[in-house]
Image: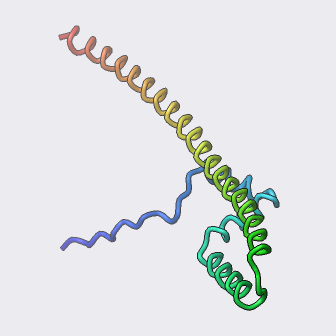
């Protein structure tokens, strides 16, 4: 009777080490934490719901002619939101660059290690050949 092997479980959330470092650096800056929070909220459905409710109430209940002021407010909000979009893009680019740099260094190290192992295998093979074939 054979024991049933438990299914292999994937590891808990594993993050790339370079991403972890960038995330930790961002966490140390109050300005970046605030920008990240605003960006996260601005890219969510609750943000859309809040705006639908506020703008509908403004247009239907608060002002008889809301368009000039509403246009100004929406324009100003668009300016700030576009800034937060760029901050989010910069954050994503920083993550990608940090990961690319880390991966490049790891691949270079792996290449050097493999090259060294290949050289050592060649030396051992040559020595083995010399002992077996030459002494035969």
Q: In this view, does 123 lie to the left or right of 103?
A: left
From the viewer's perspective, is residue 9 above or below residue 45?
above
Give 111 or 82, whichever is nearer the viewer: 82
Residue drawn at point x = 65 percent, y = 47 percent: 94
Please identify the residue farthest to the top as the structure is shown.
Answer: 134
Residue 4: quadrant of the picture = bottom left
Front position in the image: 112 or 117: 112
Residue 12 x, y percent position in the rendering: 50, 66
Asked if 34 appears above or below 24 in the picture, the reply is below
Q: Which residue is outermost to the right?
A: 30
Residue at image position (70%, 81%) is 55
Q: Using residue 45 as the reference point, say whether residue 126 is left or right of it.
A: left
Task: List x then y, in percent, for residue 93.
Answer: 62, 47
Figure coloring:
rainbow
Q: Position of residue 92 (x, y in %)?
A: 61, 52
Relative to 35, does residue 54 appear above or below in the rendering? below
Q: Quadrant of residue 68?
A: bottom right
Residue ranking furthest to the bottom? 61
Q: Position of residue 110 (x, y in %)?
A: 47, 33
* Residue at 59 percent of width and 38 percent of height: 101
Q: Nearer the viewer, residue 109 or 64?
A: 64
Q: In this view, does 50 lie above or below 35?
A: below
């Amino acid at each position: 009777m054979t024991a049933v092997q438990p299914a292999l479980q994937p590891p808990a959330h594993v993050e790339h080490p370079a991403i972890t470092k960038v995330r930790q650096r961002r966490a140390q800056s109050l300005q970046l934490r605030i920008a990240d929070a605003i960006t996260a909220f601005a890219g969510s459905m609750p943000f859309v719901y809040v705006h639908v409710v506020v703008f509908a109430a403004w247009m239907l209940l608060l002002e008889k002619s809301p368009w000039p002021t509403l246009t100004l407010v929406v324009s100003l909000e668009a300016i700030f939101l576009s800034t937060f979009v760029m901050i989010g893009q910069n954050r994503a680019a920083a993550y990608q660059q940090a990961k690319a740099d880390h991966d490049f260094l790891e691949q270079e190290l792996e290449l050097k290690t493999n090259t060294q192992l290949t050289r050592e295998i060649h030396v051992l093979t040559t020595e083995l050949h010399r002992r077996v074939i030459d002494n035969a």
